[in-house]
Image (spheres, rainbow, N blue to C red):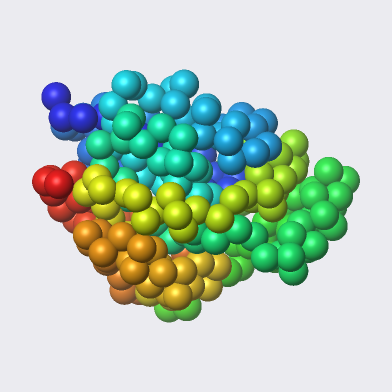
Amino acid sequence: MSETLVLLPGMMCDRRLYQPQIDYFSISREVIVVDFGLANTMRAMAETVLQQAPAKFALAGLSMGGIVAMEVMRIAPERVTRLALLDTNPRAEIPEVQAARQPQMEAAASGGLEQIMREQMIARYFASNTDTSQLTEDATAMALDLGADVFVAQSQALATRPDQQNTLAEVIVPTLILMGEEDLLCPKDRHDLMAQLMPHANYTIIPDAGHIPCLEQPQLTNQALVAWLQATG
């Protein structure tokens, strides 16, 4: 059996984010999708990953999941055999975004979670030429199932996250940097920066995809992940 693949979901997402990858890769290897629970710091999220994962594992994360993956690499790089960072950002959160989180958290706690997700987040997830109706409903369902308490915890973790550029500069395992070509939330300059920090990485841009290429273009995403899982150091 091949090495275990550990997948880290983005903010307010669960295993449904990776269903095409679970279906494809679980034929040949164990696939674990981590549940972060109510962890409200990147350190706590990373420790949750390390508790749920085997001793050695391949690690992939999208958006917030990619940020958690970087924290795993900071505190326990010896556990990770290979790293995939999808549609994510190595920088600490800028003050303007931090400031916007408090009213979002208050609104979510007061019953406004669905409106926040649909209008402020999910509306920016997908490529412009994609039929997003079903994807929007799926993303909304994931968020509502997780609930407002998780939204608040994950918002706190993102707002207080550390800059991980030094962490990435020390990564030596086989690495994939992947983004949807039309990602509005984690645009290309973030991925260019990661590629500069990790010149050994395979940098892949998925056409006709936004922030969620694993659902928007699952076949192309899976092809990139196959090449990553086969890569040697």
- Write down the quadrant of residue 229 in the picture: top left
Q: Is residue 90 visible?
A: yes
Q: Is residue 19 visible?
A: no
Instruction: State left or right for residue 14 relative to residue 218.
Output: right
Q: Where's residue 189, x and y in %?
A: 45, 75
Instruction: State left or right for residue 111 relative to residue 128.
Output: right
Q: Quadrant of the N terminus?
A: top left
Q: Where's residue 96, x and y in %?
A: 74, 69
Which residue is at a point 49% across and 42% down the rendered structure image? 71
For residue 146, above or below residue 105: above
For residue 221, above or below residue 111: below
- Write down the quadrant of residue 192 in the picture: bottom left
Taking depth in this image into account, of 29 and 65 the one nearest to the observer is 65
For residue 58, above or below residue 134: above
For residue 61, above or below residue 124: above
Which residue is at a point 83% across and 43% down the rendered structure image? 109
Which residue is at a point 16% across and 29% down the rendered structure image? 2
Which residue is at a point 46% across and 35% down the rendered structure image? 75
Q: Where's residue 211, x and y in %?
A: 47, 64
